[in-house]
Amino acid sequence: MPSTIALTVARYRPEQESEPTLQTYEIPYRKDWVVLDALNHIKDNVDGSLSYRWSCRMGVCGSCGMKVNGTPKLTCATFLADYVPGPVRVEPLDYFPVVRDLVIDVTDFVRKLKQVKPWIIREGDGAPSDGEYLQTPDQLDAYKQYSMCINCMLCYSACPIYALEPGFIGPAAIALAQRYNMDSRDQGAPERLQILSEHEGIWQCTFVGECTTVCPKHVDPAGAIQQYKLTGATHWVKSLLMPWSHR
Amino acid sequence: MSAPHYTLYHPRWYRRRVSVWWWLQKRSYTTFVLRELTSVFVAFFAVVLLWQLRALVQGPEAYAHFLARLRTPLFLALNGVAFLFVLFHAITWLHLTPKAMVVRLRGKRVSDSLILAANYAAWLVLSAAVAVVLLRV
């Protein structure tokens, strides 16, 4: 077991340099450390100027997504032990503008997420006294997988379509739209179909499948998109054969 | 002391340009681009089929000419390559179907491997049917 390990970290300080550079830190190796622990060690003991996002350190908040040796990962769930003897290369997520060091700008994702209306839509709510909306375990199972998404954006960073067509609404947003579409309490599917069947929506996806591979929560956005394509196509055929029906 | 200077938006974001060779950076990306490329060869087969139909309509002489053309080394090579790509197209397509198809039997989702097996079985049955028709003639 090595006593130290090298961490090669992408640095970008816009006030100093016009493009990112790599900086290597030799830090103690501990087999129970994840990449985020290593970054925290650097920040606390070696170089306080290193910038990166993190919060929960347990795979819930979705803040610490970075590229580790070229693959999008949650750094809180990526053990140094898997990269021995190193060096471990840590870079910001691809296809997002870099603000500083490992910090990316998430505005584009947040805007797209909001577009798909990821909340329960009802055509007129009952009064609270009418009681709660009931749901069977089977109805819960229909969407539960998609509800595990933590908005970490690893899927965007793995998606070459998003790289080439920045307007693409993207894997996580579509998976989350599907999370609400499949929810038995929701009535907003027609509204979301309008947004998702546009040019920038589901049809941009040509099924590379990498979003599903990198997803740390096993959401399977690629599956969600393909299933939604089926819904979209069925809806289109229906509207062609029965133009008088509203849905 | 002057007041700290704030800007609303970061003026100096760094945006990395996507390399033209992005599809060579990962095996899955290369597979994907190859799969997309197979459409060209599927189109090639369709064109050959149309050409064959036209020759058939034009009479026995034209059809014999068509067959002679297909026997040239160039067409044999082209057809060989196209066949490999169409095979790749079919196999990758079948392997993607379980993602797009959610089949529920008695409330439980049918496993991916079962859907895949059903697809392969259908492919086998159809190919056998085509072979029977062709070999009988």
Image: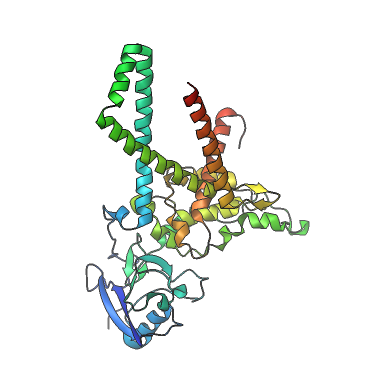
Tell me which residue sits at (49%, 65%) in the image: A216
User: In the picture, which quadrant includes the C terminus of chain A?
Assistant: top right
Q: Nearer the viewer, residue A98 or B42?
A: B42
Q: Is residue A234 visible?
A: yes
Colour theme: rainbow
Tell me which residue sits at (29%, 26%) in the image: B71
Tell me which residue sits at (77%, 59%) in the image: A129
Q: Nearer the viewer, residue B74 or A247?
A: B74
Image side of residue A60 versus residue B68, left or right: right
Image side of residue B74 versus residue A146, left or right: left
User: Considering only vertical position in the picture, is A19 above or below A123?
Assistant: below
**Residue B65 screen position, x and y as percent:** 29, 18
**Residue B20 screen position, x and y as percent:** 26, 52
User: Considering only vertical position in the picture, is B8 above or below A230?
Assistant: below
**Residue A141 screen position, x and y as percent:** 65, 57
User: Considering only vertical position in the picture, is A200 above or below B79?
Assistant: below
Corner quadrant of residue A67: bottom left
